[in-house]
Amino acid sequence: MITPLDSRVMDANAEALGVSVEELMGNAGRAVADFLKETYPGKRYAFFCGHGNNGGDGFAAASLLPKDRVKVFCITSPEKIRSPVVRGYMERTGKSPRQSDLDDMDFDVLVDCGLGTGLSGKLRPEYSDYVQFANAFKGPRVAVDVPTGLGTDISVKADITIALHEVKTGMNEENCGKIVVKDIGMPDKAFAETGPGDMLRYPVPAPGSHKGANGSLLVIGGGPYFGAPAMAAMAALRTGTDLVTVAAPESVFHEIAAASPVLMIEKLPGDHVDTCHLEKLLEMAANSTAVLIGPGLGKNEGTQALVRMFVKKCPVPIAIDADGLNALGKDFKVPSENIVLTPHAKEFERLGGNRENVPEGARNLGCTVLFKGRIDIISNGDRTKFNNTGCAGMTGAGTGDVLAGITAALLSKGMSAFDAACLAAYISGKAGEKAFADKSYGMIATDVIERIPEVLCEGLKR
């Protein structure tokens, strides 16, 4: 099953792959028309279409059926159709669809193409009236993709639902009748690989949101190194997290603070993070929406013990990178599915994973793995996705810290572990491509950080 958002992501990714919405809509119309001709030969069909893409699928199907056996109605005013693609298919029907005449039942099969996926609450009055009309119809009711109103307080009681590409979340025989899945030519890569459509998953802040409402991230790092936690924290801020606090040993406090005046730094006594800091860090985590642990921590035995203890008790989602991964070891059991590990090949092997089978490793670990490579592999054991963005210039020091910061930022903004890892890989790679176009092989990790906002600007326009 796929979610309504998955459908939108796939449509956008397909378009980026060269398969247009017009082509997908045409394929959907052909699949629906062929099904109707085979299942109800010689019958008269009435299409009830909304003003969005679901209505477009209906118009496309109606245009392929004999005109003397087709009626086409718009559930709302045809003037509400804004999409030129939908309007184009409406014109291909050769008819002038009028707003639904709910007294006209002079047809044999009702084809429901009103509203697509992702609805909740109550339908607008015109759609509610239409659903009641449809449910009073005595003949076969065929819904396209999903029955209108599914997910609301009232929906069309379909005898058959033609699911396009894949069954959608919440669909079953009780609310959809017999479900028939039809291929519409969606490219496999549109779902198997990240693409510009994945930016639709980015949690855009509400207009009235307040400080801290869009993520509060705790970065635990530093000790022998100070650049790594600073870069991870700055990457998180550039990704849109409202508040980022770095908890670091006092020995590197000033160096990390000097990275930017917008960073908040919590000074931990000593020259490395240790088990004596556990309660303080757990308290800070409880006041955050996500944690990143690992950048620049080093391999002190006390530090490694702290990491293992903290990960087991942390109450919020965590991204674990670098020395945080090295602290876990092969026998460590990840306590939550809300964890993202960001290993390269050697780190994954130390966790007991095999680069040839990342999904199996993720399944054994019980969390999401963002396996870094020329092609990133993201898997939670059930779902796997590939990321092709990035460039050869991203092999320098610090780019992994940037990716970890982006991942943790998206976790802090409320994304699921798997979706956050996928989108982070995409954003990091695209930012790297932009930096490479300007700096070539002289690019450094901070160049990638500075390009993150450009990726957001482009991706969030859609």
Image: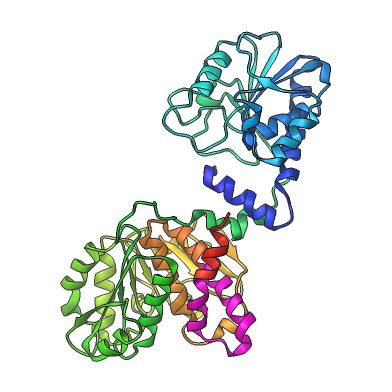
Query: Is 281 on the left-hand or right-hand side of 5?
Result: left
Residue 384 lies, with reference to residue 152, above or below; the image says: below
Main SS, magenta residues? helix
Colouring convention used in this rendered image of the protein: rainbow
Residue 368 lies, with reference to residue 144, above or below; the image says: below
Q: Nearer the viewer, residue 89 or 161?
A: 89
Q: Nearer the viewer, residue 122 or 37?
A: 122
Magenta region: 425-452
Q: Position of residue 14 (x, y in %)?
A: 68, 53
Residue 225 lies, with reference to residue 112, above or below; the image says: below
Quarter assignment of residue 69: top right
Identify the residue at image location x=32%, y=76%: 262
Quarter assignment of residue 293: bottom left
Identify the residue at image location x=57%, y=34%: 116
Asked if the magenta segment contains residue 447, the reply would be: yes
The quarter of the image holding the C terminus is bottom right
Q: Which of 324 and 443 is in front in this view?
A: 443
Q: Nearer the viewer, residue 221 or 341?
A: 221
Residue 371 shows in the view: no
Q: Which residue lies furthest to the front in this view?
A: 79
Q: Where is residue 407 in the image (x, y as percent from the top left)?
A: 43, 67
Query: Is 236 on the left-hand or right-hand side of 312?
Result: right
Residue 304 lies, with reference to residue 381, above or below; the image says: below
Q: Where is residue 406 in the image (x, y as percent from the top left)?
A: 44, 69
Q: Position of residue 388 (x, y in %)?
A: 62, 68
The quarter of the image holding the N terminus is top right
Asked if the magenta segment contains residue 249, the reply would be: no
Instruction: Give the total number of marks visible in the rendering.
Output: 0
Residue 108 shows in the view: yes
Identify the residue at image location x=77%, y=31%: 91
Identify the residue at image location x=64%, y=38%: 82
